[in-house]
Amino acid sequence: MSPPLILGCLWVLAAAVTAMLPMRRQMAPGLALLAAAPVLLVWIGWLHGWLWLAVGLFAFVSMFRNPLLYFARRAMGRPAPLPKELEK
């Protein structure tokens, strides 16, 4: 198995563990996973082709749909409410 696929599997396991944390504890590891995903996806796509890049991108968007929607709303200047668990 190639290194990007091994790292991809470890990324998925780390994302699953992060999802099990309480909402306030998810922020730092979730942002790190969010930042690492594009690099990992490009690496997988470069070595294994666009089909595996598409599969990985679909999985990434599925797992991180709420943070991605939040950042997209903020980028467009629209209101982006935080989850109730994160409000003070």
Image (tube, grey):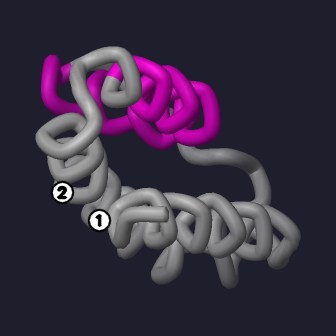
- Is residue 39 on the magenta stretch? no
Residue located at (63% from left, 59% from top): 12
Using residue 75 as the reference point, say whether residue 65 is left or right of it: right
Task: Kindly indicate whether the residue at mark 1 contacts the one at mark 2 (C-beta within 8 angstroms).
Answer: yes
Residue located at (62% from left, 38% from top): 63
Q: Position of residue 36 (x, y in %)?
A: 29, 65
Is 19 rendered above or below residue 59?
below
Using residue 84 as the reference point, say whether residue 4 is left or right of it: left
As rendered, which of 63 and 77 lies closer to the eye?
A: 63
Per the image, the residue denoted by label 2 is: 39
Q: Position of residue 56 (x, y in %)?
A: 45, 33
Q: Is residue 35 visible?
A: yes
- The quadrant of the rendering that contains the C terminus is bottom right
Per the image, the residue denoted by label 1 is: 36
Q: Amino acid under label 2?
A: Val
Using residue 88 as the reference point, say whether residue 76 is left or right of it: left
Q: Is residue 80 visible?
A: no
Is 3 rendered above or below residue 77?
below
Q: Amino acid under label 1?
A: Ala
- Mark 2 to mark 1 CA distance (whole Å): 6 Å
Q: Which residues are magenta?
A: 54-77
Disc 2 packing (10 Å; few <14; some 14–19; many ≥20): few
Is 82 rendered above or below residue 34?
above
Kind of element beneath mark 1: helix
Residue located at (68% from left, 46% from top): 83
Q: Position of residue 76 (x, y in %)?
A: 15, 18
